[in-house]
């Protein structure tokens, strides 16, 4: 009985071994070839072209600024009798009133710019390099002053130097005279004073920014070598301030050429600038072609000077 069992077990074992041997020595099963998965097709971009996004601001700019400007230029070539002609330009350029207004505008703008440069440089030097109580508050006030409207400064000068202002009132109280001596606000000098008063902070702001970046070690070295304050200003501070002076002066010159509120609120009837001439021709005389011609000339001068201002500001880094 045991012999039969051992025989059957041995037979089964040998049979399994031969089967395993035949399997191991047989032909190997073919390996499945893996094909790479197809790359996903890139989705079509749904973003709009760049020029489409530029259309809304360009349309607003054209409607709000370029279209009125085009109307002004068109009207300047259209005389009252109709048609297109250069007669409005010939009439305006031949007018003595226009030449006087152009001369007055230029000399007031240049004089105000020079005054702002000198006064702004001196005041910026004091604020930046002379320690005094409240210096930082004054520097901050200059930033606030830039937001003031120009007519506000003119009204303040009228309260002080006007015909019935504080200065004339004090003079009449002290001397008993019937009238005070201060009547210069209605002259070109009054306009010049008002413009210098209002536009000087526009020069001081870039100067203070330039002075804040100046290395104080240079000042100390120059002082230790025996240089006086005037020489330090001339040889150390002024070269560093020239770009800021050029940028601020260019901006003031452009703004003075287009100033209207100061001349109007001073009541200087004998002072006619190009903006005042545009107002007189359009509102008082209803001569719209002539007013448009003067406006085109004023715009051309302003754009030219503004281009100069941008070049100077870019070089100065302002």
Image (spheres, rainbow, N blue to C red):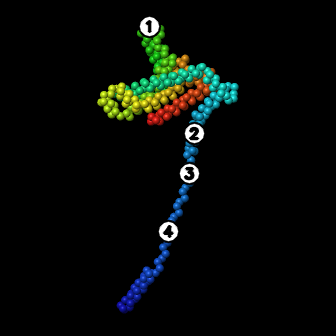
Which label sits on residue 176?
1
Which label sits on residue 58?
2
At which x and y percent is residue 31? 48, 73
Q: Choose the circle earlier in sequence order: 4 or 2.
A: 4
Count of marks, rendered view: 4
The answer to whether the residue labelled 3 contacts the one labelled 4, judged by CB atoms less than 8 Å apart, is no
Give the mark toward the camera: 1 or 4.
4
SS assignment at label 1: loop
Which label sits on residue 34?
4
Q: Choose the circle earlier in sequence order: 3 or 1.
A: 3
Residue 212, compared with residue 90, is above or below; it is below
Which label sits on residue 136?
none
Q: Choose the circle earlier in sequence order: 3 or 4.
A: 4
Viewer-proximal residue among 176 and 118: 118
Q: Choose the circle earlier in sequence order: 1 or 4.
A: 4
At which x and y percent is residue 231? 36, 27
The answer to whether the residue labelled 3 contacts the one labelled 1, judged by CB atoms less than 8 Å apart, is no
Residue at the spot x=56%, y=51% of the render? 46
Q: Distance between the residues labelled 4 and 2?
A: 57 Å
Classify 10 Å Cα crowding around label 3: few (below 14), some (14-19), many (20 and above).
Answer: few
Quadrant showing the C terminus: top left
Give the mark toward the camera: 3 or 4.
4
- In the shown orientation, is residue 224 left or right of residue 296? left
SS assignment at label 4: loop
Label 3 belongs to which residue? 46
Residue at the spot x=57%, y=39% of the render? 58
Residue at the spot x=64%, y=24% of the render? 90
Residue at the spot x=47%, y=14% of the render? 182
């Amino acid at each position: 009985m045991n012999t039969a069992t051992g025989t059957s077990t041995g037979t089964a074992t040998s049979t399994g071994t031969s089967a395993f041997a035949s399997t191991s020595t047989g032909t190997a099963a073919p390996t499945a070839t893996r094909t790479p998965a197809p790359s996903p097709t890139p989705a079509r971009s749904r973003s709009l072209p760049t020029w489409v996004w530029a259309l809304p601001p360009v349309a607003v700019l054209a409607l709000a600024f370029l279209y009125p400007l085009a109307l002004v230029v068109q009207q300047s070539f259209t005389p009252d009798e109709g048609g297109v002609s250069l007669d409005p330009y010939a009439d305006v350029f031949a007018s003595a009133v226009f030449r006087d207004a152009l001369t007055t505008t230029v000399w007031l703008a240049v004089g105000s710019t020079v005054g702002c440069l000198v006064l702004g440089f001196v005041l910026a030097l004091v604020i930046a390099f002379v320690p005094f109580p409240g210096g930082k508050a004054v520097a901050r006030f200059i930033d606030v002053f830039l937001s003031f409207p120009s007519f506000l400064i003119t009204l303040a000068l009228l309260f002080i130097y006007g015909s019935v202002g504080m200065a004339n009132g004090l003079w009449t109280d002290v001397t008993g005279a019937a009238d005070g001596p201060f009547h210069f606000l209605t002259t070109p000098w009054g306009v010049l004073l008002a413009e210098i008063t209002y536009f000087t902070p526009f020069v001081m702001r870039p100067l203070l920014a330039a002075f804040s970046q100046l290395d104080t070690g240079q000042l100390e070295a120059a002082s230790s070598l025996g240089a006086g304050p005037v020489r330090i200003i001339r040889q150390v501070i002024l070269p560093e301030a020239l770009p800021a002076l050029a940028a601020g002066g260019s901006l003031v010159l452009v703004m003075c050429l287009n100033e209207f509120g100061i001349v109007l609120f001073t009541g200087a009837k004998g002072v006619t600038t190009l903006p005042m001439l545009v107002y007189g021709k359009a509102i008082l005389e209803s001569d719209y072609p002539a007013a448009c011609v003067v406006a085109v000339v004023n715009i051309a001068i302003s754009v030219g000077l503004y281009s100069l201002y941008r070049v100077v500001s870019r070089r100065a880094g302002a």
